[in-house]
Image (cartoon, grey):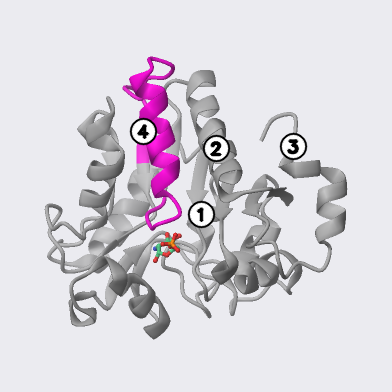
Amino acid sequence: MKVLIFKSPEDATEAVAASLIGQVLDKPDASLGFATGGTAEPVYDLMVSAFEKGKVSFRKVRAFNLDEYIGLTPDHPMSYRCYMRRHLFDRTDFQPENTHIPKGDAQDPAVEAVRYEEEIDRSGGIDCQLLGIGENGHIGFNEPTSSLSSRTRVKTLARGTVEANSRFFDRIEDVPRLCITMGIATILGSRKCLLLATGKRKAGAVAKMIEGPLAAICPASALQMHSNAVICLDEAAAGELNLRAYYLDVHPDGKVAAL
Ligand code: GLP
């Protein structure tokens, strides 16, 4: 695990966006895994801005999102399909046929989950998976006690996740309880995992992910098993790390030759 601690959330976000853009410059048809949530939004803003300045094109990039709510149609404003269109896809030259997100309105979500996993496999796998982390340590929607060898499947959201995500909905009752999410083994199958966490709210989960035992109670701790996982943090999210001084010693201010 490469643990990079940046002075500000903006610096951490910029490093993550630069890394994703760098992947595309190196490999124009790269396969990128995307995350939703508040933390990812400024990353997408920076990708849009690079596109607008003519620095990068996403025309050949293949996109695979981590998860989707069950019961929302793709055009529902709170669906993750709509989120991705609003924040990234419709503001750049991503080709709709290259953007993949589980179908939350599929007739049989369990079948859809298997189809999605196969779609990732058939495409040759994900080059770089962007991740956020839930306050309870979830990645994607793999809630605590998710199997560390899970594949894409239907999951029930934890109460805390429903509460945390209710800020995006009019009423908490509107937040779906079920989702389709890539599994932990699916995520670990990506050639690179790039996790961004900012703010004090995430400090406890971040400490468990990096320094806690590998355990299903903290799904993000599974990244300890990945040979190319880069964790980008701001000072606040790094606030509960015991070995903070060591990480800063290795990569002062989060600096590293290439992420
Ligand atoms: C959501 C998403 C995750 C995301 C996480 C953190 O529920 N399923 O992919 O990383 O929770 O979200 P935020 O960045 O809004 O804190």
Q: Which residues are magenta?
A: 35-63
The Cα atoms of the two marked residues, 2 and 3, are separated by 12 Å
Earlier sequence position, callout 3 versus callout 4: 4
The residue beneath circle 1 is 187
In the rendered image of this protein, does residue 240 appear above or below residue 235? below
The percent position of residue 88, horizontal first and vertical second, equals: 31, 38
Is 98 placed above or below 114 here?
above
Q: Secondary structure at mark 1?
A: helix
> Residue 247 or 99: which is nearer the viewer?
247
Residue 145 makes an appearance in the image: yes
Q: How many marks?
A: 4
Query: Hey, what amino acid is under mark 2?
Result: Glu
Q: Point out the frontmost of discs 3 and 4.
A: 3
Amino acid type at circle 4 is Arg
Tell me the quadrant of ligand 1: bottom left
Q: Are marks 2 and 1 in contact (CB under 8 Å)?
A: no
Q: Earlier in the sequence, mark 2 or mark 1?
A: 2
Q: Is residue 198 left or right of residue 82?
A: right
Disc on res. 14: 2
Query: For mark 3, what is the residue?
Result: 255
Gap in angstroms between the C-alphas marked 1 and 3: 25 Å
The residue where tag 4 is placed is 62
